[in-house]
Image (tube, helix red, strand yellow):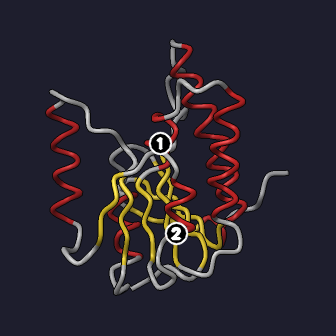
Amino acid sequence: MISARKGLTLVSGPCKGGKSKWAESLLINQKNVLYVATSEIFEEDKRWEDRISIHRKRRPTNWNLAEVNSNLDNLIKQSESSQSILIDSIGGLVSSHINQPDKDWELIMDRFLSSLKNIDKVIVAVTEECGWGVVPTTVVGNLFRDRLGYISQELDLLSIDTWLVIQGRALNLKEISIKVS
């Protein structure tokens, strides 16, 4: 069984590829876990409610839960030193701030990224891969894709391990890849 190490571990992949399940498995042996759910709950969206329900049922009952999509940097800084953190997901963070002007978004992103530097605890962050197929036809769709792509690359630079989870299989990109420069 593979476990997350101290520092940031990034877990990435497409929708329904198994990334959340893999991220949870990396922390299954941790005694004190804070699960940070960043996505907003959409009223009257049965599919979204079903997805959240699957995540809730799968989570160990002894894990703590925080539903946060703003001030994530403060949550990380103020968390217990012995507490491991699972952030699911970066896409929820981006979508929660999608209407922020670029200047404000960059400040939010910089604070979040700064909170992850030189950490002395286990943090696993899940991020979505988008843009592998259809190009969004809306301004907001393109903005989401661009912001998520940028922050994911920045998170990779801070991470000790980066996993790509696709079709239920996990690959450690830090072990098998070459950095594009």
**Callout 1 secondary element:** helix
Name the side, left or right, on which 15 lies relative to 111.
Answer: left
Residue at 36% from the left image edge and 59% from the top image edge? 20
Residue in front for this viewpoint, 83 or 27: 83
Residue at 50% from the left image edge and 48% from the top image edge? 90
Q: Position of residue 55 (x, y in %)?
A: 23, 57
Which residue is denoted by mark 2 in the rendering? 78
How crowded pointer 1 is (Cα within 10 Å; few <14, some 14-19, many 20+) is rated as many
> Image quadrant for the N terminus?
bottom left
Residue in front for this viewpoint, 161 or 120: 120
**Callout 2 secondary element:** helix
Which residue is denoted by mark 1 in the rendering? 91
Assess whether mark 2 and mark 1 are in contact (beta carbons under 8 angstroms): no
Disc 1 versus disc 2: nearer the observer: 2
Q: Position of residue 12 (x, y in %)?
A: 50, 54
Q: CA distance from mark 1 to mark 2?
A: 22 Å
